[in-house]
Image (cartoon, coloured by chain):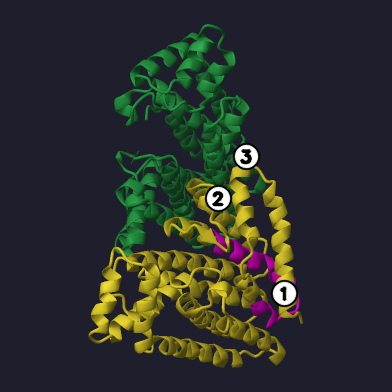
Chain colours: A yellow, B green
Amino acid sequence: MKTLEQLSAMIDSAVQMKNQVWASQMPVNLYQPVSYSMSAGGKRLRPLMVLLGYQLFDDQVEQSIPVAMAIEVFHNFTLLHDDIMDHANVRRGLPTVHKKFSANAAILSGDAMSFLAYGFLLECTSDKLPQIMKLFTSTALEVCEGQQYDMDFEARLDVTADEYIMMIRLKTAVLLGCALKAGALAGGANEEDADKLYEVGIRLGIAFQLQDDLLDTYGDESAFGKKIGGDIVANKKTYMLIKALETAREPEKSALMDWIMAKQFNAQEKIAAVKSIFDKLNIQTQTSDLIQSYLEGVLSLLAEIPAAPERTALLENLVHKLVNRNN
Amino acid sequence: MKTLEQLSAMIDSAVQMKNQVWASQMPVNLYQPVSYSMSAGGKRLRPLMVLLGYQLFDDQVEQSIPVAMAIEVFHNFTLLHDDIMDHANVRRGLPTVHKKFSANAAILSGDAMSFLAYGFLLECTSDKLPQIMKLFTSTALEVCEGQQYDMDFEARLDVTADEYIMMIRLKTAVLLGCALKAGALAGGANEEDADKLYEVGIRLGIAFQLQDDLLDTYGDESAFGKKIGGDIVANKKTYMLIKALETAREPEKSALMDWIMAKQFNAQEKIAAVKSIFDKLNIQTQTSDLIQSYLEGVLSLLAEIPAAPERTALLENLVHKLVNRNN
């Protein structure tokens, strides 16, 4: 059995090996943004979940590297395109691809990455490959749907908490579910266990995104790596804002609406004011409680997986790390 | 055996059926551009080639409809993204998706279409599916490479004829090769025949694009459906311009360069002047001759395919139609 660190090292070395190829592949203007994006690091959470899912059922964990690479490359493809759509200038402390190269480069290199992802998948020798391909393809489409809902919600003030959870399920959680389930299937899991691991990924993904939202408002700026309060400034319809809009009474309700509608304002003032309304409404605790309930769902499902406890424990460790992270 | 008209009707009805689903699928802002793009028509050349490739080897041609749909949806995905990158406003007589909806819609709906394409492929029940998936995936990546070369060439004046053929091979021809070969494989062709049909597609694709270039300069505006001379106005490095730059002597060489470098000019004057240089250099005949030589390659390869002559004849008819078209 391999440790989290060993599995992470396997992923890093697989990414680095491919990056050396992409860095000099022709046409240069297509593959350089691929290599730039893939070498920027990030948590490598999704490929790690593929390997962890695989290792619950089998020791030849290197067999799942192609699936892990597919999911990491796919994830980075979505970042290239999302960053254009969201006008994001910085990602992982570096200029985004459309800023560093061009919007056209981010579009086309992103497209290439989606096909590179399928290329990795097709290297997988598992007899479950057709099933993994179907899972991956329906997941990819759902991720597009999630991004669309996210953009649609920007223009709306009446987004419900249920709608928000549905959106982050599509945009974020299904890919974690897909990672765990694809790894498990490649490792020889039966249908029932693979489906449970999919659900583990879903709940973890929702908890992960809610934690992200919490950190954006209540995190420590130096650890978080980006400005605190960005979601508040942009009126992002997070679970926290939705809950605040749902539960606020006067005069907080009007104050909150005024800040949302304000065209000109001092960002620090808006952040402080909205935060203090959140605090009055106990939004931080409500969100933490919701995260906790998803987390309990994760752990109880994991307990049902018939794998050696030390293997399940690796996943549990990762789950705790993710939900207790500060960045 | 089905006629060209019957096969076309099969494709139209498959597209229409899916379009009805997409037209009302949620999220609306993701699927409406898909339905808009797919209902705009076009030649449906690529799906037709899948069916023709299949019918060379088997009669259950409806079995290849999922592959045909995959390739048509993929082709339309590339149009959505190419039209953003090329700032094209009109496609098939209608506003392009990024004009009608938004750039974000064209990016994200295009992405969704690439995964919808894989979804169709995965409906195919052929035992050759893994091979078809690999072919499709490497083809898709090559199409991205071709689009990148096309954009790279815009900034260069020293593009050679060989480079141009390499570019249109990637951007246009490999998808025709993939369509014919995937259809043939699904129909039960052996490796050797499938590879020959791939080459048929490649040569036909190159001839097709050269013909497109010819029509852009020498076509009949009302039949062609867009303004004649657009490539000349935009200094597009077509085979014709490349050959003219290669073979022009003074004073034509300087005159041509002056028109290329001119920042301000009357479009009709430029078109007429460049055309008259082309005429002096016999560019139209040279291009027609090159098309003819690719066409002969197509026909001699087709003659080697061990299928009933009336089945090969359908493909030959299509080839002649395409290369003698005026739009």
The quadrant in which the C terminus of chain A is found is bottom right
Tell whether label 3 touches label 2 (CB within 8 Å).
no
Read off the chain for label 3.
Answer: B
Q: Which mark is residue A7?
A: 1
In 3D space, how far apart are the residues under numbered discs 1 and 3 (Cα atoms)? 44 Å
- Comparing A69 with A216, the one in front is A216
Three-letter code, disc 1: Leu
Please determine if labels 1 and 2 lie on a single subunit. Answer: yes
For marks 1 and 2 on the same chain, the one whose residue lies earlier in the sequence: 1
Q: Residues within 10 Å of mark 1 (few under 14, many from 20)?
A: many
Which residue is label 3 attached to? Answer: B196
Disc 3 on helix, strand or loop? helix
Give the residues in magenta: A52-77
* Identity, as a three-letter code, of the amino acid under mark 3: Lys
For residue B6, above or below residue A184: above
Between marks 1 and 2 in the image, the one whose residue lies nearer the viewer: 2
Vertical placement of A75 versus B289: above or below? below
* Amino acid marked by disc 2: Lys
Marks 1 & 2, CB-CB < 8 Å contact: no
Label 2's element?
helix
Cα distance, mark 1 to mark 2? Answer: 31 Å
- Answer yes or no: are tags 1 and 3 on the same subunit: no
Quadrant of res A158: bottom left
Q: Is residue B292 visible?
A: no
Say if mark 1 contacts mark 3, CB within 8 Å: no
Residue B164 visible to an observer of this rendering: yes
Total count of labels:
3
| Mark sitting on residue A100 | 2
**Quadrant position of residue A2:** bottom right
* Disc nearest the viewer among 1 and 3: 1
Indicate which label's residue lies in the foreground, 2 or 3: 2
| Closer-to-camera residue (B99/A97) | A97
